Amino acid sequence: MPKMTLSHFEASLLFAFFTSIVLGVITKRTDRERIRYAAYCFGCFIVSIFGLSWLMYLGHG
Amino acid sequence: MAPTPVSKWAGVVALAWLIPGGGHFLLKRPGRGALLAACVAATFLLGLMMRGAFFQPKTDDLLTTVIYWGGFIGNLMAGIPYLLANWLGYNQADVAGHVHDYGSKFLVAAGLLNILAMVDAFEIATGKKD
């Protein structure tokens, strides 16, 4: 099994990507709604990642 | 409304646990099953490739107990991928480093995503969802 080294950002992006797909698939009824909701969740993850990252950066001083 | 007989959904939920997406295939939802299987498998494989550690159940103070038992249950809920990795001897020690940390979390996340898939399969099997 090859070893993989990812940055915090890359790992967070991958987590957000797969989790968004699952949330889209299980919560909505039509394919169109699923795609839209998955994209929405992914967007929320991205905003949270950047927001929390800046918060930690500024809080760290 | 009368509860759905256990026999109607138990097999589906058990299969959904053992084989991620398997419950959906049994319920003739191959597209959703394939997507869920791919997401759970990819998350689990990324966890292995980042050399994440599996949680072992441990009882100590409340926080330790919740973290280790919670992590163990999360790992276990990934089904066959977890059992297979164990049987094939994957035994990564819990070492310091952000990549290993992310790996451990990805391994638990795979199990949590599979729980969502199991709940979805349960709701389809009991007719709460189409």
Image (cartoon, rainbow, N blue to C red):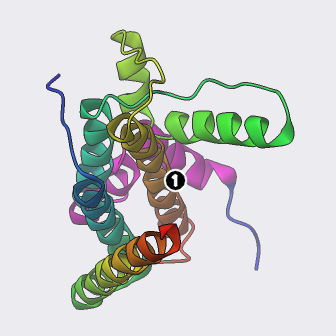
Secondary structure state at the residue bearing disc 1: helix
User: Residue B7 location, x and y as percent?
Assistant: 62, 48
Residue B19 visible, this angle: no
Q: Is residue B122 above or below residue A40?
A: above
Q: Is residue B122 above or below residue B41?
A: below
Residue B67 visible, this angle: yes
Q: Is residue B108 above or below residue A33?
A: above
Q: Is residue A39 magenta?
A: no
User: Residue A11 location, x and y as percent?
Assistant: 28, 53
Q: Is residue B39 above or below residue B56?
A: below
Which quarter shows the C terminus of chain B?
A: bottom left
User: Residue B1 location, x and y as percent?
Assistant: 76, 80
Which quadrant of the figure has residue B117? bottom left
Stretch in magenta: B6-33
Residue at 29 percent of width and 90 percent of height: A33
Chain on which label 1 sits: B
Give the main secondary structure, helix, strand or loop, of the magenta stretch. helix
- Between B124 and A29, which is closer to the camera in this rendering? A29
User: Residue B3 location, x and y as percent?
Assistant: 74, 67
- Between B77 and B107, which is closer to the camera in this rendering? B107
Residue at 42 percent of width and 28 percent of height: B82
Residue at 61 percent of width and 23 percent of height: B56
- Which residue bears the numbered disc 1? B115
What amino acid type should be assigned to the residue bearing mark 1? Ile
